[in-house]
Amino acid sequence: MTILNHDFLALTLANPESITPFQVSFSSGVGFVEETGILRLEPKQASAVSLVLSVGIHGNETGPIELVNQLVSDILTNKVTLGVRLLVIIGNPVAANAAQRFCDVNLNRLFNGAWQHYEGFEAKRAQRLEKAVSDFYALSPADSEQIRLHYDLHTAIRGSVHEKFVIYPFVEKAVYNKQQLGFLAASGIEAVLLSHQSTTTFSYYSHAVHAAHAFTVELGKVHPFGKNDVSRFSELEKALLLLIEKAQFAQTPLSALRVFSVQDALVKDDDSYQLNIAPNASNFTQFEAGYQLAHSLKSEYRIKQNGDAIVFPNTNLPIGQRAGLVVRAIAAEDLSLV
Ligand SMILES: [Zn+2]
């Protein structure tokens, strides 16, 4: 087997469920296709940096898939010199072929072992992806210098007041990494949402289980394959190239970032549950204190402070699931950084 035309995405979409493992070589290293959509690239020169780049965890989020596929192609054709260990993951090829977010279950709710409670392709896939990440970090030199990274790249269903933003995983003592935040700012990220609890997302798994610097990165709106303006990711691409070639983190002052903390999680508590927002309302849309943001026959939610905003509103889900987050801007200077 080979990666025809150095097109890892085409190979993955042509073999959406599984593939027999094989190796490829290029001038700066060697690559291992371990399973469909799972490509481990090891540099010739030993590196302390182990970087996981995952895309397409939601099958229809094609922009980041195309970005990372180009990067892989540039490495395999020796245009880009690999200077770090790199694990590339195309998360859900079956859903990507169907141009759907997922087939049976939302894959990004199945990590941290949650897959054990579900059936279907996504449950098996989550288990396999956890193993790929686990094996990848385990193969790196076990010294204190090791830097584990995981950027899980997504695009969102709806627009956003802050087009590009990241979700910082819940960290126990609320101490955040300055270099990572500076790198994200340099990558064109405008806002950081500090997660308020542990979750079952892919990035949270890498953070909680492997102590990686791990982020869910939202890069703008969903478009079909071929309809993405990849130039919108140019700052991220530049920062990733510096990281991949030279193991360096591009830095921009943190004052460029808007920081939000989660105030409340909205939970759909009844079939009558409704959000009082426009159907196409953007993420981070703000409201005035007292505004009735949600109501059902059982409850209502009113905005507590002027400027509180909604992120990820969605009522098209089962009772008991999260219908959105209410977030509040906080000053970047107030963060504890290390
Ligand atoms: Zn997504």
Image (tube, grey):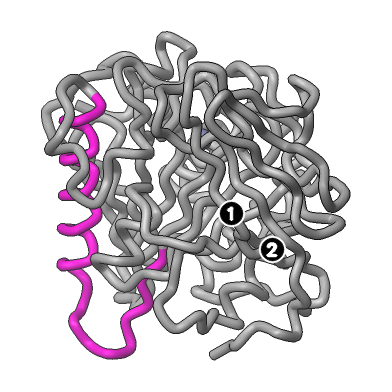
Q: Is residue 100 above or below residue 179?
A: above
Tell me the element at label 2: strand
> Which region is colored magenta?
122-149
Q: Could you tell me residue 193's position as x and y percent?
A: 62, 59
**Disc number placed over residue 241 in the picture, else none:** none
Q: Which mark is residue 260?
A: 2
Residue 127: name its quadrant.
top left
Question: Is residue 138 within the magenta segment?
Answer: yes
**Is residue 83 something that shows in the picture?**
no
Q: Residue at x 59, y 87 (%)?
A: 337
Q: Is mark 2 within 8 Å of ligand 1?
A: no
Give the prevailing secondary structure in the magenta stretch.
helix
Distance (Cα) linking label 1 and label 2:
12 Å
Would residue 116 be seen by someone viewing this image from the given angle?
yes
Please name the residue shown 29% across and 43% down the image.
39
Q: Is residue 47 left or right of residue 119?
A: right
How far across and down, in percent of the image, does residue 276 sit? 75, 28
User: In percent of the image, x 58 and y 54: which residue is there?
Assistant: 264
Three-letter residue code for mark 2: Phe
Query: What residue is pinned by disc 1?
Result: 264
Q: In which quadrant will I find the C terminus?
A: bottom right
Dot 1 surroundings within 10 Å: few (below 14), some, or many (20 or more)?
some
Front-most of residues 182 and 103: 103
Q: Quadrant of residue 136?
A: bottom left
In this view, the mark in front (1 or 2): 1
Q: Is residue 65 magenta?
A: no
Q: Is residue 95 above or below residue 185?
A: above
The image quadrant where one finds the N terminus is top left
